[in-house]
Amino acid sequence: MERKKELKQAYKEVKVECGIYMITNKQNGKKFVASTRNFKTLNGTKFTLENGLHTNKELQKEWNEYGKDSFEIERLEVLKIPENQYMNEKKELEKLLDKWMEQLQPYGDGGYHKRS
């Protein structure tokens, strides 16, 4: 029983990293850029793509067409959260995502996003 408590405590102490990631189609260079509140959820993103459930239909279509080996998923930036200080993670992630969208311009022939 003590071991279970230790494992629970260790899990609670694991630092969660949030930030911006990018999925790149290596065949045509198109990019999908998004934020996550936990980089560990990228496995879930891969799962949705592999099972045809991703919300971005164009990305999903090309994933199905080219296959998973034609795509690369990478972290672009980890959001730095100051210790002992409150930060609105959601708002800061939105700012970070805006910065990367502006820099990479993943629209039209260059990406899977539509301009709003």
Image (spheres, rainbow, N blue to C red):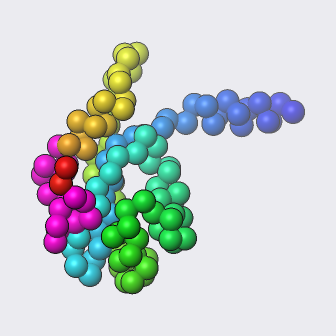
Picture coordinates of residue 53 (x, y %)? 50, 65
Query: Vertically, is 83 above or below 26?
Result: above
* Occupied quadrant, residue 24: bottom left
| Residue interval drawn in magenta | 99-114
Q: Residue at x 44, y 48 (%)?
A: 39
Picture coordinates of residue 19 (x, y %)? 34, 43
> 79 or 30: which is nearer to us?
30
Image quadrant occupied by the N terminus: top right
> 103 or 85: which is nearer to us?
103
Picture coordinates of residue 78 (x, y %)? 32, 42
Residue 38 in the magenta stretch? The answer is no
* Occupied quadrant, residue 113: bottom left
> 25 or 6: which is nearer to us?
25
Residue 106 in the magenta stretch? The answer is yes
Residue 8 in sight here: yes
* Occupied quadrant, residue 25: bottom left
Task: Judge left or right: residue 101 versus residue 50.
Answer: left
Q: Residue furthest right?
A: 1
Query: Vertically, is 43 above or below 58?
Result: above
